């Protein structure tokens, strides 16, 4: 399916929860954020129904995000449901990997193809500071478990302040090179000012080539990360919500009132 600017839209990013087990400084305030009431969070059946409609319309790539998707109870069941939709060619997940070592094998068995893992530094003390208490050893355990389970290629998402030449970023890059892991650098964003850059080593932020729609965990199809637009699949139904989002997808991102990355995974 194409939007009004002729861009082919074949990628759906699905936020399964706005909850997270870390409190990264660039993502949320120390006190956390107001969470979506659990009664308003989409069920696995609702997510799968929406995904099936999206695939019928041309989506063939799906990524599960959060918050942190692995804190959603029974996440492997959702992976199994999505993997059985005819036409899904690539089913992936973005995760901080804190819980990945205990879930990797089940996710792979359920049909997950690969993972992207957040890693902003190789230094334990910096990681603990940035994440407000996270243990970097669990990330490395998660990477090892993902490799054993065949969730490859494993890509590392490294958030940088200004550029990939920063010391922490270069250390992550070296680690990736030594271990056969792809590394992508994501510059910190400013939603209120509409500031973002193209992901170095990836396609995010490249508006003329954007191929994605997003589903928030409370059921809104969002056509752009840097936009306040959202269309409810519960009020409109999956097909109409997708069509409305497609019709209103902006040419490029701009200023918006909410930091959606906290809830829909960037």
Image: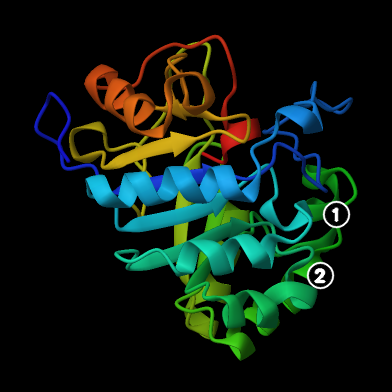
**Colouring scheme applied when the structure was drawn:** rainbow
Residue sitting at x 44%, y 29%:
221
**Left or right for 66, reference 166:** right
Q: In terms of depth relative to the viewer, which is nearer, 160 or 243?
A: 243
**Left or right for 70, reference 255:** right
Q: In terms of depth relative to the viewer, which is nearer, 35 or 237?
A: 237
Q: Quadrant of residue 4?
A: top left
Q: In terms of depth relative to the viewer, which is nearer, 138 or 74?
A: 74
Q: Secondary structure at mark 1?
A: loop
For the N terminus, the quadrant is: top left
Q: Are marks 1 and 2 in contact (CB under 8 Å)?
A: yes
Q: Position of residue 17 (x, y in %)?
A: 69, 41
Residue sitting at x 68%, y 79%:
106
- Whether residue 36 is situated above or below residue 86 in the rendered picture: above
Q: Position of residue 91 (x, y in %)?
A: 44, 65
Q: Secondary structure at mark 2?
A: helix
Q: What residue does disc 2 label? A: 138
**Left or right for 27, reference 21:** left
Residue sitting at x 61%, y 60%:
78
Residue with the most extreme bottom position? 148
Residue neighbourhood size for the residue with mark 2, other residues' Cα within 10 Å, grouped as few (<14), some (14–19), many (≥20): some
- Marks 1 and 2, how far apart in space? 9 Å
Q: Quadrant of residue 27?
A: top right
Q: What residue does disc 1 label? A: 134
Q: Is residue 164 visible?
A: no
- Disc marking residue 30: none
- Whether residue 63 is situated above or below residue 233 in the rendered picture: below
């Amino acid at each position: 399916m194409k939007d009004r600017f002729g861009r082919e839209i074949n990628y759906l990013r699905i936020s399964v929860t706005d909850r997270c087990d870390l409190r990264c400084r660039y993502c949320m305030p120390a006190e956390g954020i107001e969470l979506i009431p659990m009664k308003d969070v989409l069920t696995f059946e609702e997510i799968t129904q929406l995904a099936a409609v999206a695939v019928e319309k041309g989506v063939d790539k799906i990524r599960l995000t959060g918050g942190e998707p692995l804190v959603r109870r029974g996440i492997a069941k959702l992976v199994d449901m999505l993997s059985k939709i005819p036409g899904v060619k690539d089913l992936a997940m973005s995760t901080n990997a804190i819980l990945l070592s205990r879930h990797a094998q089940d996710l792979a068995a359920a049909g997950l193809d690969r993972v992207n893992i957040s890693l902003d530094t190789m230094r334990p003390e910096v990681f603990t500071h940035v994440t407000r208490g996270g243990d970097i050893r669990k990330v490395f355990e998660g990477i090892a478990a993902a490799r054993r389970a065949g969730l490859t290629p494993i890509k590392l998402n490294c958030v940088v302040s200004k550029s990939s030449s920063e010391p922490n970023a270069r250390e992550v890059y070296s680690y990736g090179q030594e271990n056969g892991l792809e590394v992508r650098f994501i510059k910190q964003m400013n939603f209120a000012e509409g500031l973002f850059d193209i992901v170095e080593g990836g396609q995010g932020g490249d508006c003329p080539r954007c191929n994605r729609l997003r589903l928030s965990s409370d059921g809104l199809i969002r056509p752009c990360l840097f936009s306040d637009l959202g269309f409810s699949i519960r009020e409109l139904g999956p097909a109409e919500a997708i069509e409305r989002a497609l019709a209103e997808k902006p040419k490029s991102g701009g200023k918006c009132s909410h930091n959606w990355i906290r809830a829909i995974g960037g």
